[in-house]
């Protein structure tokens, strides 16, 4: 058996081969492979990444090639990071000063602040239909939701990346403009207000009202949902959850917030 290769058997009896190595006291699994030859090639790929020599430049992240390398790309990135920074991070993560890079592939690189490192060493980012998500408690969760961005929020209207890079989630670059369902910021001259709107099953949109604060607008939206449900509407509207408002304060705002009369007369 080749160095770093170990035969194993799946639950259904299928035989396969695992590759692994130990570097600087860290045992690293390189994955499972259908043949001994592929497992050995993955092991050699890993050794080439970790080997340092004064006579040659070690391979970098962008040197990975799916046609010539058997070692999976995420393992390749993790090994380059371990070699350069001395810290093992699960996943395709490379540490930079004050932030880290998460490599979807050699062309798409997501940047996160250091505070997100623990989360993304335990959650694998996937991409489908242009959307980035992780599996959390068996559910597919958009990574945007981690930063307070609602499902179906629109870039440029509900949130913006200041430097124009939609893959740069470092602190200060992502600004959430509209945090709540049905709430939009509006400006008339220098005065800013918050408009609350709700979409009806018919496809039309009804203005609930305009409010001085974002919290009032969000609660007005919730109140409109309650009213419409009481009137027989069965649409599954998503209620706003306000973390910074106490239950007592919520009840006071809910009781006092005004709803447009036009909404009160709508029937299913």
Image: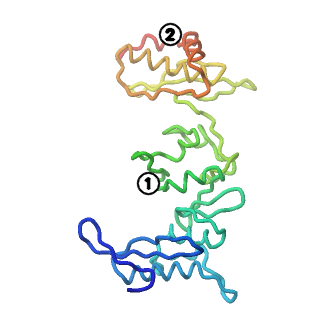
Q: Nearer the viewer, residue 9 or 94?
A: 9
For disc 2, the neighbor class at 10 Å (few under 14, some 14 to 19, many from 20) is few
Q: Quadrant of the N terminus?
A: bottom left
For disc 1, the neighbor class at 10 Å (few under 14, some 14 to 19, many from 20) is few
| Residue at mark 1 | 128
Residue in the picture at 56% in, 67% down: 78
Q: Nearer the viewer, mark 1 or mark 2?
A: 1
Decide: is 182 above or below 12.
above
Q: Is residue 8 left or right of residue 131?
A: left
Q: Quadrant of the C terminus?
A: top left
Residue lying farthest to the front in this orientation: 25
Where's residue 194, x and y in %?
A: 62, 24
The circle on residue 261 is: 2
Residue lying farthest to the right in this orientation: 190
Where's residue 34, x and y in %?
A: 33, 76
Q: Is residue 167 left or right of residue 198?
A: right
């Amino acid at each position: 058996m080749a160095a770093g290769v170990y035969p194993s058997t799946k639950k259904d009896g299928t035989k396969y081969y695992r590759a692994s190595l130990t570097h600087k006291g860290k045992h690293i699994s390189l994955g499972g492979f259908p043949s001994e030859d592929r497992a050995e090639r993955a092991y050699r790929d890993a050794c080439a990444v970790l080997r340092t020599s004064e006579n040659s430049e070690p391979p970098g992240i962008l040197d990975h090639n799916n046609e010539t390398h058997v070692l999976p790309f995420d393992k390749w990135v993790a090994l380059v990071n371990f070699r350069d920074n001395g810290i093992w991070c699960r996943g395709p993560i490379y540490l930079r000063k004050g932030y880290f890079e998460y490599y979807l592939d050699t062309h798409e690189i997501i940047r996160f602040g250091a505070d997100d490192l623990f989360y993304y060493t335990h959650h694998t980012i996937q991409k489908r239909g242009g959307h980035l998500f992780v599996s959390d408690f068996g559910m597919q969760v958009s990574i945007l939701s981690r930063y307070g961005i609602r499902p179906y929020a629109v870039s440029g209207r509900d949130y913006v990346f200041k430097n124009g890079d939609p893959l740069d989630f470092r602190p200060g670059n992502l600004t959430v403009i509209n945090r709540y369902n049905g709430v939009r910021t509006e400006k008339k001259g220098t005065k800013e207000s918050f408009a609350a709107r709700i979409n009806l099953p018919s496809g039309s949109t009804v203005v609930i009202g305009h409010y001085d604060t974002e919290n009032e607008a969000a609660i007005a939206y919730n109140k409109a949902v309650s009213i419409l449900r009481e009137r027989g509407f069965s649409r599954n509207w998503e209620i706003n959850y306000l973390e910074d408002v106490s239950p007592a304060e919520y009840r006071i705002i809910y009781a006092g917030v005004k709803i447009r009369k036009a909404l009160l007369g709508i029937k299913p």
